[in-house]
Amino acid sequence: METNDKTSPVTPEKDRNSISLDLMHRMRLHGMAAAFSESLQATFAETMTPDSFLNWLLSREWDYRVARNIERLVKGANFRYNDASVAQIDYTLPRGLDRNQMERLASLDFVRKGDNLFITGCAGTSKSYLATALGYETCKAGMRVLYANASKLMGT
């Protein structure tokens, strides 16, 4: 029996779980499908009520979509560093960096107000790292970022 992408793949050979997984993938509910597959491998789902199981599946789908969106935003920003984080900044180095100011910037209030941020300083003072760390925070908040150094910004 053949099926197309517009109809439900109901065939006598497939069990309900396989049909459900197939439908989830075809409906692009990949996070939910991964969670459902995980529940089939473990026994914890048997202890859940139908309401809590559905809530768990939907939460996993939501988390999957949020993570994919952040991944897309980070990729589009073209950051210089792949692992920059405001939490990993070393404030013990003598470069005049104020922890309180960085934490205020990491709250992203300036972004929400529509303000720009220009980071200036001597070579080797971690300007690119700081910009990338703040950019990652902005992506995690679901906002688009453009990372550009001075020469890229000036078009040279």
Image: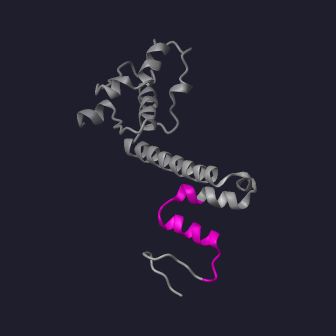
Q: Who's the residue at 35% across and 39% down the image?
A: 144
Q: In the visual, does 118 lie left or right of 68?
A: left
Q: Is residue 13 magenta?
A: yes
Q: In the visual, does 114 lie left or right of 133?
A: left
Q: Quadrant of residue 93?
A: top right
Q: Who's the residue at 42% across and 48% down the image?
A: 72
Q: In the visual, does 137 lie left or right of 112?
A: right
Residue furthest toward the left? 155
Q: Which residues are magenta?
A: 12-33
Q: Who's the residue at 42% across and 75% down the image?
A: 6
Q: Is residue 102 magenta?
A: no
Which of the image's four quarters has the C terminus? top left
Observer able to see residue 73: yes
- The front one of 6 and 73 is 6
Q: Quadrant of residue 117?
A: top left
Q: Who's the residue at 43% across and 35% down the image?
A: 141
Residue 102 on image: x %, y %: 45, 19
Q: How many numbered marks does the figure carry? A: 0
Which of the image's four quarters has the N terminus? bottom right
